[in-house]
Amino acid sequence: MSPESSPYTGRSWGNANAVRRVETPGLPPYYVFPHLEPHVFCGFTTRAGGVSVAPFDTLNLGTTTRDEAACVEENRRRMSAAFGHALGASIRLEHGCRVVRVDAGESVADKPCADAVITCARHLPVAIYYADCVPVILVDPRRRALALVHAGWRGTMVEVSVRAVEAMQEAFGTDPADLLGGIGSSIGPCCFEVGPDVKDVVCARFPQWQESLVSVDKDLHTRVDLWNLNLLQLEHAGVPRRNIAISRLCTACRDDLFFSYRRDRGQTGRLAMLAVLP
């Protein structure tokens, strides 16, 4: 199924060509954002093309799972070959809003726990690993800088994507109007069902947007739209809506394509988003 035929069709999430699937014979497939390609390499993975066995089948890239270390190593080797860039360490996540900067010669593995990383270093791969949380890429083509953001629901509540924009402004002189963005595969508004506690937090934090963020179906199940919330936050921070592409690929819906922590009750693999400035 293509992004255009996503099971969630309640609203428009950018144009139908928001992402493109890249396939190379003998290597794992991945997705890219075409509008970012002139300025950065950014790819995000699927679960296909690896060697891991269930429940991590097959391209588990996460070292924090119970998968065999040798399988994860081989999966990362295959994915690095597909990307054309080394897929290695990620920032250590804490589901908050801290942003760290990594420069040439540094490793994100040596940085404090955070949920966003910024850099202006050329040819330096930065990555995040996830399995439902919202991966966000931000690129400043004028200042030649990027941010990679892990926006789980807790991080989204404290506006981690906005904190990344602010960090780029301070570090690189970024004008938010220049930023291009992409929201990768993650749990969609079709599947992110929440209880009253989370609903109340969303409505209290973002009352101006609650009608477009919270939906209740005929069975009184409440769902929250993290895609739209990150989009609205970025727009409010000055990033033009037209510059942000949303993949519309739900990790929970697409068990054939993606791992999902919620769907698989925690026993699952990890996906990756990788970004490199040329």
Image (cartoon, rainbow, N blue to C red):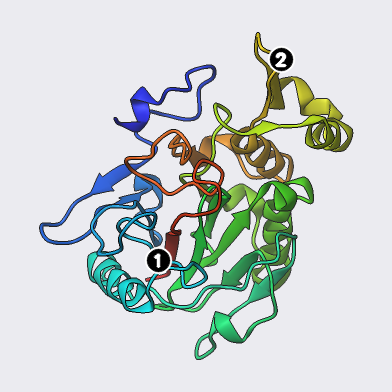
Left or right of 218: which side holds 183?
left
Left or right of 26: which side holds 134?
right
Q: Which residue is mark 2?
A: 220
Q: Residues within 10 Å of mark 2 (few under 14, many from 20)?
A: few
Q: Which residue is more in the foreground, 167 or 273?
A: 273
Q: Residue furthest right?
A: 204
Q: Which residue is more in the foreground, 110 or 76?
A: 76
On the image, which quarter does residue 225 sit in? Answer: top right
Q: Residue drawn 56% across and 82% down? A: 109
Is 79 rendered above or below residue 111? above
Left or right of 112: which side holds 47?
left
Q: Residue drawn 26% across and 70% down? A: 84
Work out which quarter of the rendered image holds the C terminus and state it.
Answer: bottom left
Local SS, label 1: loop
Q: If you read the primary sequence from the N terminus, does the residue marked by circle 1 or circle 2 appear first?
A: 1
Q: Residue drawn 64% across and 52% down? A: 151
Looking at the picture, how far across and down is residue 94, in whole percent? 70, 66
Is 231 rendered above or below residue 189? below
User: What's the distance in space between the residues labelled 1 and 2, CA to CA?
Assistant: 36 Å
Left or right of 21: which side holds 114?
right
Q: Residue furthest left?
A: 25
Looking at the picture, how far across and down is residue 102, in whole percent? 59, 80
Which amino acid, by three-letter code, is at mark 2?
Leu
Local SS, label 2: loop
Which amino acid, by three-letter code, is at mark 1?
Leu
Q: Which mark is residue 61?
A: 1
Work out which quarter of the rendered image holds the N terminus and state it.
Answer: top left
Q: Residue drawn 42% across and 22% down? A: 7
Q: Residues within 10 Å of mark 1 (few under 14, many from 20)?
A: many
